[in-house]
Image: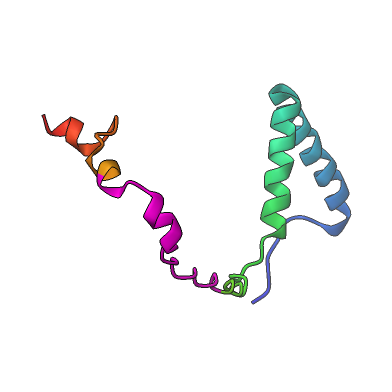
């Protein structure tokens, strides 16, 4: 299907210059940050492909953590386990039960 256009090829440079002047006039009012944001958006739009990019490869799963080792008997023999279990710690769940 042919494209109908009222723009002649010799008019394109003049139209492009006029469009650039209009864009610059608007961007001048927005300041340097607005100008940079505008051109960043234009660059992103023109560099974005029409089709979705191929999916990225999934990272390898993390290695499985080793199982906890039992406490050595010489350490367990020295720890006062019943006394440690009976301690009431600050911030424990028992403090919130009351």
* x and y percentages locating residue 88 in the rendered image: 24, 34
Quarter of the image where the N terminus is located: bottom right
- For the point 80% across and 34% down, the residue is 21
Q: What colour scheme does the image use?
A: rainbow
Give the total number of marks visible in the rendering.
0
Instruction: Work out whether 29 lies above or below 64.
Output: above
The one of 86 and 13 positioned closer to us in this rendering: 86
Q: Nearer the viewer, residue 9 or 80?
A: 80
Residue toward you, 37 or 77: 77
Q: Specify the quadrant of the image occupied by residue 61.
A: bottom right
Q: Is residue 55 above or below residue 97?
A: below
Q: Residue at x 43, y 66 (%)?
A: 68
Along the horizontal axis of the image, is 88 left or right of 18?
left
Q: Main secondary structure of the magenta part?
A: loop
Vertical side of 10 occupied by 25: above or below: above
Return the residue found at the far left. Answer: 98
Q: Is residue 68 magenta?
A: yes
- Whether 51 is among the magenta residues is no
Percent across and percent down for residue 48 are 67, 60
Residue at horizontal 45 percent and vertical 67 percent from the top: 69
Picture quadrant where residue 92 is located: top left
Find residue 42 and report its horizontal and vertical position in percent: 70, 48
The quadrant the C terminus occupies is top left
Q: Quadrant of residue 55?
A: bottom right
Q: Residue at x 54, y 69 (%)?
A: 62
Q: Write down the region rendered in magenta.
A: 61-82
């Amino acid at each position: 299907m042919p494209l109908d256009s009222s723009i002649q090829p010799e008019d394109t440079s003049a139209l492009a210059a006029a469009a650039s002047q209009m864009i610059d006039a608007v961007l001048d009012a927005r300041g340097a940050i607005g100008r940079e944001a505008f051109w960043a958006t234009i660059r992103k739009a023109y560099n974005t492909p029409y089709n979705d990019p191929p999916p990225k490869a999934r990272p390898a799963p993390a290695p499985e953590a080793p199982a906890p080792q039992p406490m050595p008997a010489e350490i367990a023999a020295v720890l006062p386990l019943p006394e440690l279990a009976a301690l009431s710690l600050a911030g424990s769940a028992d403090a919130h039960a009351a």
